[in-house]
Amino acid sequence: MILPIVAYGSPILRKVAVDISHDYEGFTKLLEDMWETMYNSNGVGLAAPQINKSIRLFVMDSQQIFENQEEDEKGMYPDEPGFKGVFINARIKELSGEKWSYNEGCLSIPKVREDILRHQSVTIEYMDEQFVAQTKTFNGLTARIILHEYDHIDGKLFIDHITALKRTLLKRKLDDITKGKINIDYRMIFAK
């Protein structure tokens, strides 16, 4: 089932999410719904707070970026062909490499894109969809998506990484999103 995406301005997007256990009620269905919602919204990642659940869960798929690359983009990123995975109760262990800029957007903040600096690599501990503990290092676009989604489970948004001046310049757009004054092609829940 395609779920509505929580829009900027909702308090749940600013909460630090809580861990879950393997017996979380309706987990399999929730995961299916998250994948369906992410792909329906043309996203490459989706965190549980974005669907109104304050739990430490996100899904991401950087493989689709590489599958849809233009010829002149091939070989630009070290993580090709990408990674598709589920991250439960994730905790960042280490950030490394140079910070690099990339133009990011967010399903909860539609039609707003900004260049964001993030580390090249992230080492992260998490459980996969089978609740098997993993520790892996990711880099490139995959690391960037993981860091973006990880921010969501920590109550942060990508616009927190831009300057105060840029945020001020975005204020009207952000206010319009909060009030639902935006046309988008996927379902959203707006702050009251």
Image: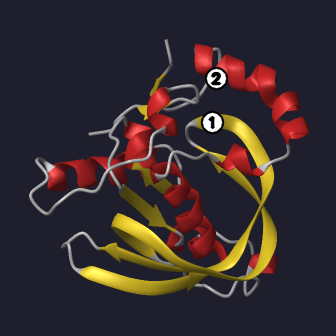
Residue 178: image tag: none
Query: Is there a contact, CB below 8 Å, between mark 1 and mark 2?
Result: yes
Mark 2 neighbour density, 10 Å: few (under 14) some (14–19) many (20 or more): many
Q: Mark 1 points at which residue?
A: 109
Name the foreground residue: 99 vs 140.
99
Q: In this view, does 159 lie above or below 173?
A: below
Q: Residue at x 35, y 42 (%)?
A: 54
Rendered location of residue 180, percent (x, y): 58, 16
Q: What residue type is labelled 1?
A: Ile
Q: Which of 174 and 77 is in front in this view?
A: 174
Q: In which quarter of the image is residue 110?
A: top right
Q: Is residue 110 left or right of residue 146?
A: right
Q: Who is closer to the viewer here, 38 or 134?
A: 134
Element carrying mark 2: helix
- Is the residue 98 above or below the residue 174 in the image? below
Q: Name the residue under label 2.
A: 177
The residue closer to the viewer here, 131 or 106, is 131
Instruction: Give residue 80's position: percent from left, percent from top.
Output: 60, 85
The quarter of the rendered structure image containing the N terminus is top left
Q: Position of residue 36 (x, y in %)?
A: 34, 49
Tell me the amino acid under the disc marked 2.
Ile
Quick one: label 1 or label 2, which is nearer the N terminus? 1
Residue at the image point whose x is 88% and y is 30% from the top: 169
Query: Taking 17 as reference, is 21 left or right?
Result: left
Q: Is residue 133 left or right of residue 8?
A: left
Q: Is residue 79 visible?
A: yes
**Above or below for 68 versus 110:** below
